[in-house]
Image (cartoon, coloured by chain):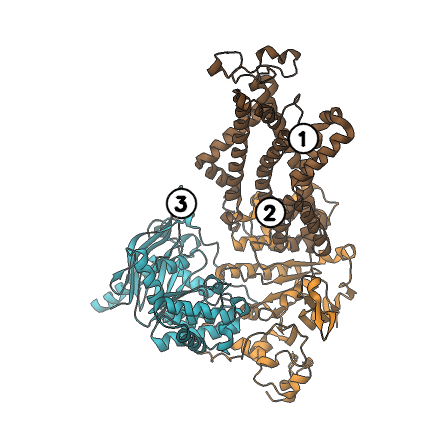
Chain colours: A orange, B cyan, C brown
Amino acid sequence: MTTPLIQISGLEKAFSTDESWLNQWRLQQGKIKRRKDNVHALNGVNLTINQGETLCVVGETGCGKSTLARVIMGLTPPSAGEIYYLDQRIDQLNDKERMFFRRRMQMVFQNPYASLNPRMTVYQTLSEPIAFHNPQLSRYEIDEQIEVLLESVGISATSSDHYPHEFSGGQRQRISLARALSVEPDFIVADEPLSALDVSVQAQVLNLMMDKQEERNLSYLFITHDLAVVEHFATRVAVMYLGRVCELASTTTLFDYPKHPYTQALLSAIPRLDSNTAQPIRLIGEVPTPIEKPIGCVFQARCPYANQRCYESSPKMILQSDASSVACHAVEEGRL
Amino acid sequence: MNLLSVSNLNVSFRLKHQDLAALIDISFTLNRGERIAIVGESGAGKSVLGFSIVNLIGKPGHIESGSIKLENKELTTMNLRQLQEVRGKRIAMIFQDPMMTLNPVITIGDQLVETIRSHTKISYKDARNIAIEKLHHVQISSAEKRFYQYPHELSGGMRQRVIIASVLLLNPDIIIADEPTTALDVTIQAEILQLLLTICRDNGVALVLISHDLGVVSKVAERTLVMYAGRVVEEGPTLEIINDPQHPYTQGLLNALPQMTLPGQRLNQIKGNMPSLAERPTGCAFHPRCPYATPRCKQEQPGFIHSGESSVACFMVEDMLSEFADQSDQEVNE
Amino acid sequence: MRHLKKDLIHPTSVSRWSHIWSGFIGDKLAVLSLVIFVFYCLFALMAPLVAPFDINDPAFMDLMNAEIAPSWISNDSRFLLGTDAQGRDLLSVILYGTRLSLTIGVCAVLIQATLGICIGLVAGYSGGRVDNFLMRCADIQLSFSTMMVAIVFLAIFQSLFGIAMYQQLAMIILILVIGLTEWPLFARTIRASVLAEKQKEYVDAARVMGISSKRIMFRHILPNTLSPVLVIFTVQIANAIVAEAALSFLGLGMPATEPSLGSLISAGFSYMFAGSWWICVIPSLTLIVLILVMNLLGDWLRDHLNPRVYKD
């Protein structure tokens, strides 16, 4: 088997909630102690991304999917765990050592209105990374590259002197993609790139992303909450809940035979056009904030099948007969 | 008699140099207990329509002409006091962001009690009981505890439930919900939609749902209006619009959904973007993006024609229908 | 795949500056303020050319001409605005004084802005302990009022190096004192905008590209935080001119031989009730109009550079 492009193992990230150092001192049983409250955004995530595939990460607000993207891109340091890019560990590198991987891994952001610098023209936005990573290029060669790049994402090269506010949301997202492609990466993390766009424009951007994947053999880590897009676009899907991956399967398997109770609830909740879909499975309560590192299964509080074991020990990812992996005691025991 | 009837409504934004028409010639009716949806992309004017119904449209917006009648009271000519009466008691609004309506520094209980007591004279204690009952009604767990919490202590879904509870306090006839679930997660969205649906059904409240998501609309609304660039382009029963869209824009919108193409295939995109208010094309506003556009579409605005139970503003549909009618005439003659 | 030429997207051009400009032209008060301000600046710049008398000419000071009322009262056509106690032509002195006041104001604010912008950027972008340290320094600085620091510093300087030395260096010292005491205002404003901008995704995008922090701070974030700075800049120049005038009035500013507007007012004040009101009133009016105009411009800028108006 070939080495996967990206390999993530045991990734954890905890954010401190107390901003002030002074607030961390508490009186506990007559003694003053320093205590930090942490929010555990990632609790041991294991994932691999193969060359040329699209791995979609789905989950609700607060499940840690955006944190995952930021940790992989080195925007936030992980608390524990390892990230490999083709067998080279990248999570502990400093800025200088990371430079090589910056060219290989790029990111497209959620908000097209905030992800382009409003005071830089399209030309400046694109020429900066190109010139930065290819200092040997002459000005003329850079201009030529930008022209090709812009036209390849469907933006007229004559508009390179315009500022971002003169473009619509979909057009800005194309420019964002052009910026990510400008350093010729082979892996792109896309953090909800469609959620701020209208349906008809979503289709344009999604088509463009698929074209680019075909053209350049790109791999995507595509983070979204829109399951319809996932079904269309993903090679494999990872479902996340409270900082853990609870199910990982190929797209068709996941949509046809969802196994984890959370995946089932999630799938049943999509408002579909056809009127004869089943009633959504109601989950009890809302997503809790993971202040304490959870003992047992992360989904226990809302799971209709939870038993004593689910409260005590956390389930491991277990490979199923149809090549999907599920972290659920109920599935393992055949209760489901 | 119709509960609400909007006819030939024109709304424009009066700017320094020009007037921009935001809504053009909008007409529709709403019956008691009916649920309709207004669908469109951002910039189509659907939120402006929602605000215009309660005459809440802020400056520089302005209702140019047309009438909005609630039963037989004309809303466009009402003074502020009469309007406020209507806004709270007869027509209620739910927004995408619950924090637009909730005051962040007052407990949700006090906000609910204040709403009740400003309209009916009862003691705090009675009002509290009514409020808690309504919180139970919208399926908020441990309502007694929530009563004393501040809005920021609740999750987004919970806040939206509180808003629905506060709307219910005054027993309105119409609820206008502007993208009520857009900011919520899928599982929560499903619950809130279900809640809205049952509440409207049980209390006989009419609902105007404003949304960009046809999936959401298909779950809730009986009738749907599709808007494009300030006009209604298609109107009809929701199921008919989804299963048999007539207007090329509606067709394009539905075809662009990922579930309409096989996985891995290119999606059917509509080329171009929705024009901004300032640069609305002449004739049918959709013609630059329409695959069936003819020279006539560039010059004339199509009127509404009936096709089945829907009505559509499109020359292509009009031509097709008249051809069809001619053929059947000929058949009869033969 | 390259797209076909006809499918390529051309943006719709809406220029922000032309929009602001058309708004500006529509606002009569703003236009009037700008016209008056430009008028001030031009006259200050061209003082040696416009002034009817050369201030450095030894013949300029002639006690024979002392305390002549403005021409419309005294009918003395030589001195349009009259003369002061030393017999200097008031118009020329005011022109030179305005020039001096404006120079001190602009230079002092340039120092404030440079210091404040750098400190604010570093504090906001680095966050954590660096931020805490720099902002506490700003708090300490702010807790001493500018006037207090200036008075103490200038008094010590005068007694250490003597009046003669002080009169030579007065301008530079004034600029430095006013410049160094008010940087926290800029630092705080910049820091607040940097904190907001830092959250935006374009900063992350630049970091993902591997661009250095220094470049991100100055090339990416700084241009997006400049609108509030522009507003404070205008208002602070007005404040600096007032501070200089106040110090001069207290006798700690510009010497009488090189009068700024403040020292003119101060010198004229003693003649106020002796009948020669114009020596004090005319420079005061000049100062008041200048400050008013600058504050009006600052207010207008604040209202119109407000990013909410240009929310895309």
Q: Is disc 1 placed on a helix, strand or loop?
A: loop
Asked if the residue under mark 1 is in contact with the one under mark 2, i.e. CB atoms within 8 Å, the reply is no
If the image is split into quadrants, where does the N terminus of chain B sit? bottom left
Callout 3: residue from which chain? B
Question: Identity of the amino acid at label 1?
Answer: Leu
Query: Circle 1 sits on which residue?
Result: C252
If the image is split into quadrants, where does the C terminus of chain B sit? bottom left
Q: Is residue B334 visible?
A: no
Q: Is disc 3 placed on a helix, strand or loop?
A: loop
Q: Nearer the viewer, mark 2 or mark 1?
A: 1
Callout 2: residue from which chain? A
Q: Is residue A328 left or right of residue A31?
A: left
Q: Is residue A195 above or below residue C161?
A: below
Question: Identity of the amino acid at label 3?
Answer: Leu
In-front residue for pair B36/A14: A14
Asked if the residue under mark 3 is in contact with the one under mark 1, i.e. CB atoms within 8 Å, the reply is no
**C-alpha separation, residue under disc 2 versus residue under disc 1:** 53 Å
Is there one chain holding both mark 3 and mark 2?
no
Q: Residue at x 57, y 27 (%)?
A: C41
Asked if the residue under mark 2 is in contact with the one under mark 3, i.e. CB atoms within 8 Å, the reply is no
Q: Is residue B249 left or right of residue C153?
A: left
Query: Circle 3 sits on which residue?
Result: B15
Q: Is disc 2 placed on a helix, strand or loop?
A: helix
Q: Is residue B321 above or below residue B299?
A: below
Q: Position of residue C51 (x, y in %)?
A: 58, 17
Q: Is residue A261 visible?
A: yes
Query: Circle 2 sits on which residue?
Result: A122
**C-alpha separation, residue under disc 3 versus residue under disc 2:** 29 Å
Q: Position of residue A303 (x, y in %)?
A: 58, 82
Instruction: Give neighbour class at mark 1: few <14, some 14-19, many 20+ (Cα, 10 Å).
Output: many
